Image (cartoon, helix red, strand yellow):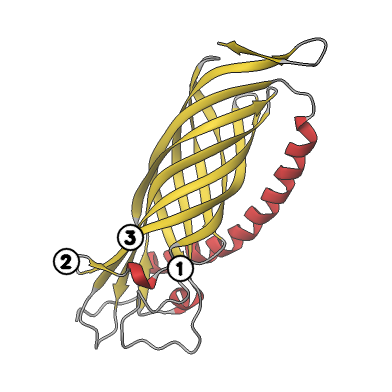
Amino acid sequence: MINREPTDILYIQKRIFIFVSNFTIQMKNSLLLSLFVFIISMGNAQTWFEVGIKGGPATTFLVNKNLFDDTQFNPRLTPTYFYGAKVGINFGEHDGIAFHAGMSEVKQDFVNEYDLSFFDERRFSARVLDIGMLYHRTQESGYFEVGPRISLVQNASLADDGGDPYDITDQVNGAYYGMDLGFGSYVIGNERLSLMMGLRFSYGISPIMEDERPVIPLIVDYEEERSVHVFSAMLCFELNYSLGYLVRSTCGNRNTWISF
């Protein structure tokens, strides 16, 4: 076993994980406020449609108090990715909803300093299908979005010291519910085709694991088991194409499709 002394990097990472826990509370409040604004603004606004593709780099965290407090099994910042597609329905110039689906990979690396363990580093990895709905609000060149999703776990594995991964899918939940919060700006485009870039944060309200036992060393025994939730931070690139809009006739009895 390699002996390691605590470093400033590990301390910074611990502070990041504490920030993640506090940030999720603000996400819940933003979701309720945004849904209220959306319901009020729908009214009689003109309806138009768009489709898009998205993707980008990300980092994920396994949120669990025991893992945060453990000074000998330390989580590290771990890069990952996501990609997907969406169909959007917009009401007027500023408000709309988008239905989206895509794949992401939840990853978390750990540095192990328990002397009686047989590995120095461990990686948890899970491939996830995300399906959700976002309310989005655009204003001038920027946008804000928030909404719920469900994440379906396709497989999960552990890999020790860079070796071959071994399957632990039966030790994680097959699905968990969460919510997304994002903001950003339009980079380039016109009324038909546009590229957007922004940040998106996701938090699993329900756990991906009922407790931390699937990922910790066998010799570790915490006083109380706690559920494990997923937090993700993503740099999102999104390319959108506007399809057209519906207009209502003056008598109000029928809608007409107009293509851009």
- The amino acid on which the numbered mark 1 sits, given as a three-letter code, is Lys
Residue 110, quarter of the rendered image: bottom left
Residue at the spot of label 1: 14
Q: Which of 139 and 203 is in front in this view?
A: 203
Residue at the spot of label 3: 155
Mark carried by residue 163? 2
Q: What element carries label 1?
A: helix
The answer to whether residue 75 shows anywhere in this view is yes
Q: Nearer the viewer, mark 3 or mark 1?
A: 3
Q: What element carries label 2?
A: loop
Residue shown at 60% from the left, 25% from the top:
141
Q: Which quarter shows the N terminus?
A: bottom left
Residue 93, quarter of the rendered image: top right
State the CA–CA distance, disc 2 to disc 3: 18 Å
Q: Nearer the viewer, mark 2 or mark 1?
A: 2
The disc, 2 or 1, on the residue closer to the chain's N-terminal end is 1
State the CA–CA distance, disc 2 to disc 1: 26 Å
| Residue projecting furthest to the right | 251
Q: Which of marks 2 and 3 is in front?
A: 3
Q: Which of 255 and 84 is in front in this view?
A: 255
State the CA–CA distance, disc 3 to disc 1: 27 Å
Residue shown at 31% from the left, 70% from the top:
168
Pinpoint residue 186: horizontal percent, then vertical percent: 53, 26
Pinpoint residue 260: horizontal percent, then vertical percent: 55, 11
